[in-house]
């Protein structure tokens, strides 16, 4: 290991916007912190060798090439959840520890899931836009009580979303590679196959965690298996949904609505994404799932705690 591993004071680069208390906390621990949230990938590669640790959110992409430029890098901290913007295989190969703030934004994302569903079901945003344009339009919406919610991914966020929905009188179906009898029991739900979930859910939520790369879960075939008129909510990753198939499903009425907090490119730059955003039965927010005062505070605290533990391990 590089000689820098024996130095308890670390030089830390923060390459994405973070809550200021994280910076202050690291500095109070005696570390040297450079806060440069607007770095390009090229600039990052030019300077990464100067740092022992780097803190990122979702903007910075730590590819194998980038990581290889960080000869003194010992620690990566993801100030949030998910590691799909980090080449985990390369990090392991290079002996770089990776920590996250898993669980810090669970409540905020689950609340956004609920908000998106209610907004689409009752057509709130659409009717508000009509009123602002001078049209006093009344349209019947859809109640959510008594319906069935299908959770694709039943980890922290999937469970908490189901917990809220159960309190509102919905039945819960879940599909996950790892099944927990304890969790599903708490919401009186049941695990089913993906096909079963798609065919029997009025509302479908995607709450999967990608561990690197992308994997499409919902394509043409899966949309064809969905209950007619279902509403799809995605606060996970856009890549798990086939964009072309999604637009067609919305146009042809297979889907009643789509709510999301993620896009295939942020900001959106493809004609098909822009078409999706313009549709009346679609609501997409600019990746704000963890953007609450409370969640950002938790992210900062958990990231600081996990970084300090990791650095103590490195120094042993």
Image (cartoon, rainbow, N blue to C red):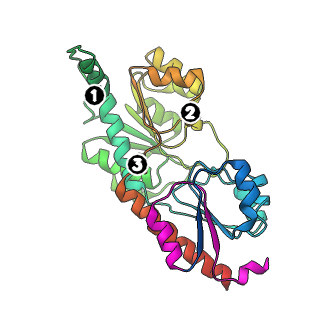
- Any part of residue 257 in sight: yes
Name the residue nearer the viewer: 224 or 255. 255
Question: Which one is earlier in the sequence, the residue at label 2 or at label 3?
Answer: 3
The CA distance from mark 1 to mark 3 is 20 Å
Disc 2 versus disc 3: nearer the observer: 3
Name the residue nearer the viewer: 219 or 66. 66
Of the 4 image quadrants, the one containing the N terminus is: bottom right
Taking 229 as reference, is 132 left or right? left
Q: Magenta stretch containing residue 28, yes or no?
A: yes
The CA distance from mark 2 to mark 3 is 19 Å
Residue 10 numbered tag: none
Taking 305 as reference, is 129 left or right? left
Q: Secondary structure at mark 1?
A: helix
**Residue 206 x/y as whole percent:** 48, 41
Residue at the spot x=49%, y=78% of the render? 28
Residue range corresponding to the magenta coloring:
1-29
Q: Secondary structure at mark 2?
A: loop
Question: Which one is earlier in the sequence, the residue at label 1 or at label 2?
Answer: 1
In the picture of the structure, the residue carrying the numbered disc 2 is 241
Of the 4 image quadrants, the one containing the C terminus is: bottom right
- Whether 301 is drawn above or below 134: the answer is below
Question: Which one is earlier in the sequence, the residue at label 1 or at label 3?
Answer: 3
Residue at the spot x=46%, y=36% of the render? 197
Residue 109 numbered tag: 3
- Any part of residue 221 in sight: no
The CA distance from mark 1 to mark 2 is 25 Å
Residue 124 numbered tag: 1
**Residue 83 x/y as whole percent:** 61, 54
């Amino acid at each position: 290991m590089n000689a820098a591993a024996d130095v308890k004071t670390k030089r830390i680069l923060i390459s994405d916007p973070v809550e200021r208390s994280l910076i202050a906390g690291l500095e109070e621990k005696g570390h040297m912190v450079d806060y440069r949230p607007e770095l390009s990938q090229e600039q990052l590669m030019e300077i990464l060798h100067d740092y022992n640790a780097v803190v990122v959110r979702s903007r910075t992409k730590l590819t194998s090439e980038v990581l290889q430029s960080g000869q003194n890098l010992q620690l990566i901290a993801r100030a949030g959840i998910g590691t799909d913007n980090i080449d985990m295989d390369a990090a392991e190969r290079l002996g770089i520890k990776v920590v996250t703030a898993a669980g810090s934004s669970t409540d905020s994302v689950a609340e956004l899931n609920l908000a998106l569903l209610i907004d689409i079901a009752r057509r709130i945003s659409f009717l508000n836009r009509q009123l602002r344009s001078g049209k006093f339009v009344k349209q019947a919406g859809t109640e959510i009580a008594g319906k069935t919610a299908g959770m694709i991914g039943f980890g922290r966020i999937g469970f908490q979303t189901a917990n809220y929905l159960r309190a509102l009188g919905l039945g819960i179906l879940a599909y996950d590679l790892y099944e927990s009898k304890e969790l599903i029991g708490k919401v009186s739900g049941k695990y089913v196959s993906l096909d079963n979930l798609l065919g029997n859910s009025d509302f479908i939520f995607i709450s999967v965690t990608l561990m690197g790369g992308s994997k499409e879960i919902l394509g043409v075939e899966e949309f064809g298996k969905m209950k007619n008129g279902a509403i799809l909510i995605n606060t996970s990753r856009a890549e798990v949904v086939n964009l072309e198939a999604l637009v067609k499903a919305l146009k042809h009425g297979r889907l009643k609505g789509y709510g999301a907090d993620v896009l295939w490119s942020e900001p959106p730059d493809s004609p098909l994404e822009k078409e999706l955003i313009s549709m009346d039965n679609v609501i997409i927010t600019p990746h704000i799932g963890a953007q609450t005062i409370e969640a950002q505070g938790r992210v900062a605290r958990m990231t600081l705690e996990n970084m300090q533990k990791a650095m103590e391990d490195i120094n042993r």
